[in-house]
Image (tube, rainbow, N blue to C red):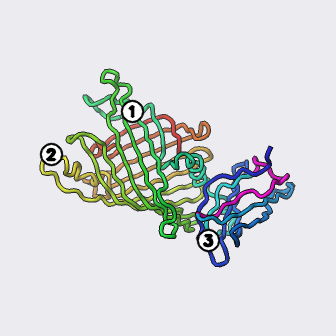
Amino acid sequence: MSLRPLFFGALFLSSLLAEGRNLTLWLSEPDGTTRRLTGVKLEEKDQAIEILLPTKEGESPRILHLLLTDEENGAKATPLIEQPTINKEQLRVVEIKPPGFKEESSNEEEEQPRLYREYHDRKNLFGSFLGIIPHHPNYILPFSHSLDDRKGESKKTEAKFQISFKTLLAQSLWGSKFDLYLAYTQRSYWQVYDGDDSRPFRESNYEPEIFLSYPTEIPLFGGRLEQVNFGLNHESNGKDIEKSRSWNRAFIEGIYNHGNLFLGLKGWYRLPEKEKSSPLDPNGDDNPDIHNYLGYGDLKIGYLLEKHLFSATLRNNLRSKGENRGSLLLDYSYPIQNHLYFYLQYFSGYGESLIDYNRSVERIGAGFLFTR
């Protein structure tokens, strides 16, 4: 059996410096801790290096031999020779990160934040499949129950699911760190318990988007501003004229990570559409007042407590009391096995679906989450 370490993960581009390419290696141990090795330099196109790995008291020294290769799309690290002091269960390279951020000297910063590490683990898992990786959470709620009165419209209990993925269109645009992504999210509400009406889909919301992503990794308030995204977003429900809902937005989003705390702040501007000439005009604005209910952005907060992930998404139109409207989405997930989680969801407010953008909804659901 091979004694080589198991190497996998994302390889991030690093800029060439005058003295060579500086690399940072993240090494994940079996106990879940992740160590950061800095000061690794690539001076030539192909270069063999020797690294003395950190050891705990009483452990034998561990030496890792790597072959660093400077390729057109970045740098690659592979084991050079097998080491009897290392086996594949003890060590794996999670990622190689570029320079461009200040290395912290604090021991507390020597471990990669767990929430961000989870993101890269799932990215590694799905990235090899047609270049598709998760975007927003993917889940299915076999039980999604409305706490509102919907007489004569639909069953109060239905199934709800969301599919969301993205793919990398272009990497390091114009010689910079900008990456271009195309993403798609679909959220569907299925009246699976309404056998009398052939179990129809009450609504589906379709959300394609294209955006630029820039990895900032700027130290901030003890954590890091990990990345900034900005792009264009379209969302619609594909209904006929009377029930059609849609809008287009330009957005900017910042993602911040501090240990097990995650923050995402997203702001958007609705791109204007022409006014309908009549209610049956197929080319006019279906919902000119949607920003009065869904506001101009949202704030996402997540916290990982052991294996429990708690998160909240808040939206508000920032108006005065009489016209103030918003929404609250609460999520809870707990791992059942690899990439399968028990999932609870609670929503209260406006905009759970496009058809209900101007009606307050309260709903609870339970099911399974596949990416978080």
SS majority, magenta = loop
What residue would you read off at disc 3? 102
At label 3, the amino acid type is Lys
Q: Secondary structure at mark 3?
A: loop
Viewed as shown, does residue 359 lie left or right of 18? left
Considering only vertical position in the picture, is 127 above or below 270? above
Q: Secondary structure at mark 1?
A: strand
- Mark 1: few, some, or many residues within 10 Å (few <14, many ≥20)? some
Q: Between residues 205 and 298, which one lies in front from this camera angle?
A: 205
Say left or right for 1 vs 172: right
- Residue 285, image x, y percentages: 21, 51
Q: Image quadrant of residue 60?
A: bottom right
Where on the picture, by quarter, is residue 205?
top left
Looking at marks 2 and 1 on the same chain, the residue that comes earlier in the sequence is marked by 1
Q: Is residue 232 left or right of residue 62?
A: left
Q: Residue furthest top?
A: 196
At x 27%, y 51%, the residue is 290
Residue beneath label 1, please? 145
Helix, strand or loop at label 2? It is loop
The residue pinned by badge 2 equals: 279
The stretch in magenta equals 73-90
Query: Looking at the image, which residue is at 74% across and 62% down?
Result: 67
Residue 103 location (% of width, % of height): 64, 69
Query: Distance of mark 2 from mark 1, alpha carbons?
Result: 32 Å
Furthest residue toward left:
278
In the image shown, does 191 or 325 lie closer to the viewer?
Answer: 191
- Of tags 3 and 1, the one toward the viewer is 3
**Amino acid type assigned to the residue bearing label 2 in the image:** Pro
**Real-space CA distance between mark 2 and mark 3, rounded to the nearest whole angstrom:** 57 Å
Image quadrant containing the N terminus: top right
